[in-house]
Image: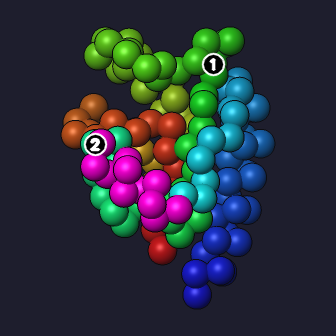
Amino acid sequence: MLSDRQKLFTVNLAKMILKSVDLSFSLRLGEVERPIEMQEIYFKSGRSKTMNSRHIQRLASDFTIEYNGRILFPPGIIDDQYKKDLELCRPLGEYWESLHPDNVWGGDWNRNGVYDESFKDPYHFEMKP
């Protein structure tokens, strides 16, 4: 049942937020719930690659992620800095994935630990329905 998944997602999100402090990250909550109309706008503009976003189901959250007072993955980031930021953020993404087998981090969609994502979304944390 979707509501049970949403509850589990929320608990896991709380755990990750608390763990982020131990890992020296500062998080600011971004988008969690997204209306289908907004998803259409994101999809048409290329900001999203799917019309089946977990945000629509309230099973995803985006964050602004800071480390040592610096925002990771700022707009216009160059590839070399993106790779450095990704490695800094990897412990947070791995922790998220360790909380449940259906948790997925947008910095490593395919969970292979390699910088090979065609869609970069490292501030995105979701749970499969």
* Magenta residues, start to end: 35-45
Where is residue 22? Give x, y as percent.
75, 32
At horizontal 62% and vertical 41% (from top left) the residue drawn is 30
Q: Could you tell me which residue is drawn at 60 percent across and 31 percent down?
A: 64
Dividing the picture into quadrants, the one containing residue 28 is: top right
The location of residue 38, given as percent across then percent down, is 46, 54
Residue 51, percent across and down? 33, 63
- The secondary structure that dominates the magenta segment is helix
Q: Which residue is mark 1?
A: 67
Q: Which residue is situated farthest in the bottom direction here?
A: 1
Q: Is residue 29 one of those drawn in magenta? A: no
Res. 67 image quadrant: top right
Residue 38 within the segment the image draws in magenta: yes
Q: Which image quadrant: the N terminus?
A: bottom right
The alpha-carbon separation of the residues under discs 2 and 1 comes to 28 Å
Q: Amino acid at mark 1?
A: Tyr
Q: Position of residue 4 (x, y in %)?
A: 66, 80
Name which residue type carries label 2: Gly
Q: At 37% across and 48% down in the image, what residue appears? A: 42
Q: Pick whichever, 120 or 42, lies toward us.
A: 42
- Residue 110 appears in the picture as rendered: no
Above or below for 22 versus 125:
above
